[in-house]
Amino acid sequence: SAYLHLLIPPYSFAMCPPGAIMDRCEDCAVTGRTAIMPQPRQGRGTVFHPFHHALRTPDKPACVMARSGETVTYRQLEDRSNQGAHLLRALGLQRGDAVALLMDNNARYFEICFAAQRSGLFFTAMSSRLSTQEAEYIIGDCGAKVLVVSASLAAQAGELCGRNPGVRARFSVGGTLDGHESWEAAVAAQPVSRIPDVGNPWLDAGIVAYSTLNYRHDRAYWEKWFPADLISESFPGQF
């Protein structure tokens, strides 16, 4: 089956707390179904976030669909995820809120994940093979306020309509569905700039949450102050 070939480490967004910063990582050269990425070095650290690649190599592929060859460049990923962040803010979602995804292999998937990540939101990806009852439970359990589904999953999406009253907006990707807005049309109306509460501190300011908030020595103090109200997209060694 077709799969996504993402040219950035998946853990740069999948394992970080919202707004958190990854530490250094060795160059990745894994082949197969896993992501591969020749890591650009900047100072002593490794740069992960698409924002940096969009500045340095905007036309380089960030995502390639194996079956169709559909390609998303770093600039497109950057712009679309910024637009998605603006859309989520316009819907009233704030740091700590949740988004749920019920999608097949789709080139728009990563922009939605990064839109949530750079907004300080949690996102929960669900298997397209779940039953309606299973999906309904997960959507409710994660507290999702926005649900994004693939148009190809029309049957599941239709059965979920009217359930999970906590979901305030439903979007479809790759086509139109009853009861859903088009994700592509909604984000196209948004600006490509960052949302105001995203910062890009210089040097190693992005790790302040761990380096100066007693993460290792006083976890209770750290939990009081983190997640912070600032969402940072900088990394150690950035100049």
Image (cartoon, rainbow, N blue to C red):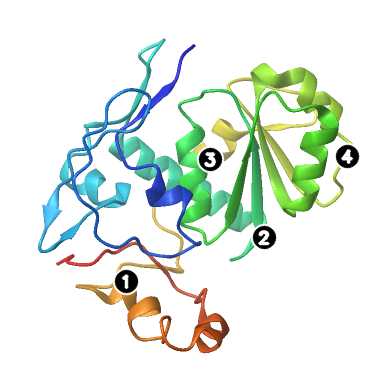
Disc 4 element: loop
Q: Which residue lies furthest to the front in this view?
A: 217
Are circles 2 and 4 on residues that touch, CB within 8 Å?
Answer: no
* Label disc, if present, on residue 92 of the rendered structure: 2
Q: Dot 2, how many residues are within 10 Å of its Cα: few (below 14), some (14-19), or many (20+)?
A: few
The x, y position of residue 154, in whole percent, is 74, 19
The x, y position of residue 92, in whole percent, is 67, 60
In the rendered image, which residue does mark 1 sit on? 206
Comparing labels 3 and 4, the label whose residue is closer to the camera: 4
Tell me how far mark 2 sits from mark 3, CA to CA: 15 Å
Disc 3 element: helix
In the rendered image, which residue does mark 4 sit on? 163
Disc 1 element: helix
* Label disc, if present, on residue 118 of the rendered structure: none
The x, y position of residue 174, in whole percent, is 58, 21
- Kind of residue indicated by mark 2: Gly
Check the picture and name the quadrant holding the C terminus: bottom left
Vertical relation: 105 (above or below) 163? above
Q: Dot 3, how many residues are within 10 Å of its Cα: few (below 14), some (14-19), or many (20+)?
A: many
- Left or right: residue 130 versus residue 119 is right
Vertical relation: 236 (above or below) 174? below
- Left or right: residue 127 versus residue 114 is right
- Kind of residue indicated by mark 4: Arg
The x, y position of residue 181, in whole percent, is 69, 33
Q: Which of marks 2 and 4 is nearer the N terminus?
A: 2
Q: Residue at x 24, y 60 (%)?
A: 24
Tell me how far mark 4 sits from mark 1, CA to CA: 39 Å
- Left or right: residue 93 versus residue 187 is right
